Amino acid sequence: MQTGQKLQALRVQRGMTQEQLAERLYVSRELVSKWELGQRRPDIRLLREMASLFSVEIDDLMDTEPVSDELFSCLPPDLQIGTDQFRALLGPFLDTVSERDRGVFLRRYYYLEDAAAIGELFGIKENYVRSILARTRKKLKTYLKEVLK
């Protein structure tokens, strides 16, 4: 189940309207609707607030699988490394990319934001965000091949 569907189910289960949830989170009802329709994703701060509000773990709200799949596609198929080793290699890799590309990468893979939200934050078009992410993942894949020889 995706984040929006989980959010809607929890909201309905608690007998809340989109308007009531929006008021509790200090956002617009339209934004709540976009989350539930999968058109936008709440940022990590709001996910934490919702998890607290609904008395669930933040992981119960998040649909991280598509984002994880994107990131782990950078691993060459013949390489087997653990999550801790992968995380340890990310820091030095991110030092090799531009500040903007690093920020875009972190907003996507750490804060789990979608391309539209990242584009708004950086003042760039959504398609350009996707291009930056694709190029950065390609660089990461090359970096991992070199480092893990």
Image (cartoon, rainbow, N blue to C red):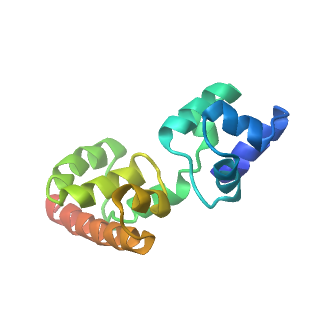
Quarter of the image where the C terminus is located? bottom left
| Horizontal side of residue 54 vs 95, given as left or right | right
Say above or below: 9 vs 50: below
Say above or below: 128 vs 123: below
Residue for point 46% across, 55% down:
68
Q: Quadrant of residue 49?
A: top right
Q: Quadrant of residue 140?
A: bottom left
The answer to whether residue 57 shows anywhere in this view is no
Taking depth in this image into account, of 110 and 19 the one nearest to the observer is 19
| Horizontal side of residue 10 vs 75, given as left or right | right
Residue for point 29% across, 53% down:
103
| Horizontal side of residue 142 vs 81, given as left or right | left
- Report the number of numbered marks: 0
Residue for point 24% across, 58% down:
100
| Horizontal side of residue 1 vs 107, given as left or right | right
Taking depth in this image into account, of 26 and 59 the one nearest to the observer is 26
Residue 124: x and y, percent?
36, 67
Say above or below: 131 vs 29: below
Residue 22: x and y, percent?
68, 39
Taking depth in this image into account, of 59 and 41 the one nearest to the observer is 41
Residue for point 75% across, 35% down:
20
The answer to whether residue 30 shows anywhere in this view is yes
Taking depth in this image into account, of 141 and 42 the one nearest to the observer is 42
Residue 6: x and y, percent?
71, 45
